Amino acid sequence: MLSLPYQPTESVKQYQFTGEYECKLDAKGRLKLPAAIIKQIGGDGNLRFTINRGFEKHLMLYPNDVWEMKTNEINQLNIYSTQQRQAIRYFYRGATELEIDAAERINLPGSLMEYAGIDKDVVLFAYQNQIEIWAKDKYDEMLDNEPDEFGSIAESIFGGIKPLGNLHDPM
């Protein structure tokens, strides 16, 4: 029986990335990470990442300790199940380790840039413990296609959650 999510036996830093950043790649395909993201990573020397394909036509960037946690989760899947084996393949496709250089840049692999349609202008969308890297035009297109009924979607997902510290609820 599959028992997700993975519970790490060693401590994994609790990242809480937040932000949306427009950036430009240099001529060699290097991306300078914004100072705000570097600050959110913290000064513990973890300047190594793994990048892979995202669920849509974008890239996912993970600090290496987060990547290890995610791979431990995916490695619990059953390789004898066609659907789970395909999920494993999709997850690992294009996965590449990256290291920040002295100028706080990462070099995006050409095959991944091609997959995501990235040329020069990108948007970094940072949330939870990961960073999505989008071609700016594809990101703008995704935003233009946000559903009009987002309020209804949010209500159906979060409507039954009782907020903490609600002063208007007498318990």
Image: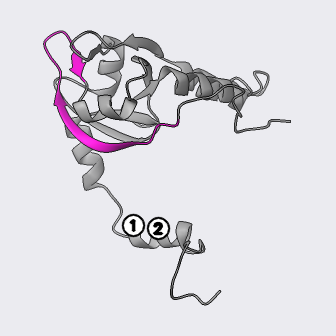
Q: Looking at the rendered structure, which numbered label has been put on residue 150?
A: 1
In the image, 97 versus 91, the foreground residue is 97
Q: What is the number of the mark on residue 9?
A: none
Per the model, the C-alpha gap separating discs 1 and 2 is 6 Å
Q: Quadrant of the C terminus?
A: bottom right
Give whichever of 100, 57 is nearer the camera: 100
Asked if the residues shown at circle 1 and circle 2 are in contact, with their CB atoms under 8 angstroms apart, the answer is: yes
- Could you tell me residue 66's position as x and y percent? 53, 28
In the visual, does 71 lie left or right of 45?
Answer: right
Q: Which residues are magenta?
A: 14-32
Quarter of the image holding residue 28? top left
Mark 1 is surrounded, within 10 Å at the Cα level, by few (under 14), some (14 to 19) or many (20 or more) other residues, namely few
Q: For numbered disc 1, what is the local secondary structure?
A: helix
Q: Is residue 84 magenta?
A: no
Position in image of residue 96 (x %, y %):
45, 13
Residue type, numbered disc 2: Ala
In this view, which residue lies farthest toward the front?
A: 43
Kind of residue indicated by mark 1? Phe
- Residue 57 visible in the picture: no
| Horizontal side, residue 7 vs residue 112: left or right | right
Instruction: Determine if the magenta segment contains residue 31.
Output: yes
Relative image position of residue 104 (x, y in whole percent):
25, 17
Q: Which residue is mark 2?
A: 154
Classify 109 as above or below 83: above
Disc 2 on helix, strand or loop? helix
Residue 82 shown left or right of residue 100 in the figure: right
